[in-house]
Amino acid sequence: MDQVVEYNVTDAAISDMRTRYMALTVKGLEDRKGLMEVHEARMVVKGKRIEVEKKRKELKADALAWSQKVDSEARRITKLLEPIETHLTTEEEKITKEKERIKAEEDRKRQEMAQDRVNQMASFGKVIPFSEALSMSDGEFFAKLTIAKSEYESEQARLEAEKKAREEEAARLAKERAELEKAKAEEAAKRKVEEDRLAAERAKIEAERKAEEAKQRAEREKIEAERRAVEKAKQEQEHRESVAKAAKEAAERAEREAKERLEREAREKAEAEQRAKEEAERQEKLKPEKIKLTQYAARLLEVAPPDVTTDAAKTIVAEVEKKLMAINTYIIKSAKEL
């Protein structure tokens, strides 16, 4: 009769473990009791499996036939134990994997937070190592960001002041050029008046010369005409009167045209000066408005952002500051274009 192979783990014990342990589950991360029960049960099943393996090796030492019988029984028992252990391992790994997922999610958020810090500092022209951004506390980062923002705004204010100084210098030079052009125009107008006066005098002298020549010619003709008939003398007298009248009309017309030209040029000059004066007055009136707008734009950037801790709130604050900067730029540009 064959010797019976016996292990310390009976079918009844395995059945009992199957009944009790296959019903065990872990309901979630907070189910500490369920996790502990699954772990303890798995340790029991694992211990039984190891105990069977140990017993198998002891029994197998007697003989090959007995060893085969021992192996067969061990495989049978192991086969019965494996589904129970597999179930318990699966339940335990659910929590292990969930913990790993949560840790990976936390690491991802920390990486995103560090990148956001790097981006915020870069918006103010500062570069910080990624590792430093990752290791800093919120307080340390806010302090660094505040300093970077202050330095950036100071630099922007300095650049704006330099730009304003350049614009004021350009305006001063433009004003000087305008005054110089005005002086040149006035001098040119004076020269034109003098040239016209001289031209009028030359025209008058020329007319008088021609009149004198005509008079002399008329006298010569008169002397010659005296030798002619009375009728011819009368015709020559009419001719002299006609020539004198034409010369007088030519002189009067030249003098009248010169006077009209001088009056027209003086009127055009006065209108140009009035337009320049009105434009200068308009620009002078706009100066307080431009200054007010520029000061208003600067005050928009003086508002300190609130101390927020969540990513969503930080995103809102960053977006608001970006929009405030855009509004500041728009106001300054629009003021200059008034």
Image: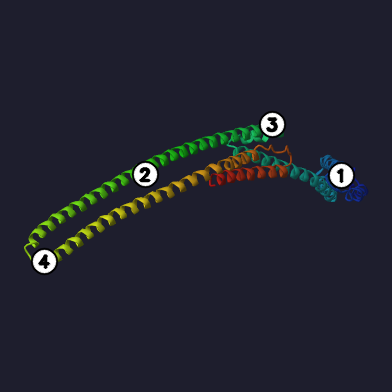
**Marks 4/2: CA–CA distance:** 61 Å
Which of labels 1 and 2 is toward the front? 2
Which secondary structure lies at badge 4?
helix
> Disc 4 marks which residue?
230
Q: Label 4 sits on what residue type? A: Val
Question: Could you say which is closer to the camera, residue 281 or residue 268?
Answer: 268
Lower sequence index among marks 1 and 4? 1
Lower sequence index among marks 4 and 2? 2
Q: Residue at x 70, y 40 (%)?
A: 110
**Marks 3/4: CA–CA distance:** 127 Å
Side of 259 where 155 appears, left or right: right
Q: Label 2 sits on what residue type? A: Ala
Q: Label 1 sits on what residue type? A: Asp
Q: Which mark is residue 191?
A: none
Which secondary structure lies at badge 1?
loop
From this viewpoint, is residue 46 visible? Answer: yes
> Disc 3 marks which residue?
140
From this viewpoint, is residue 127 visible? Answer: no
Q: Which mark is residue 31?
A: 1
Dot 1 and dot 2 residues touching (CB under 8 Å): no
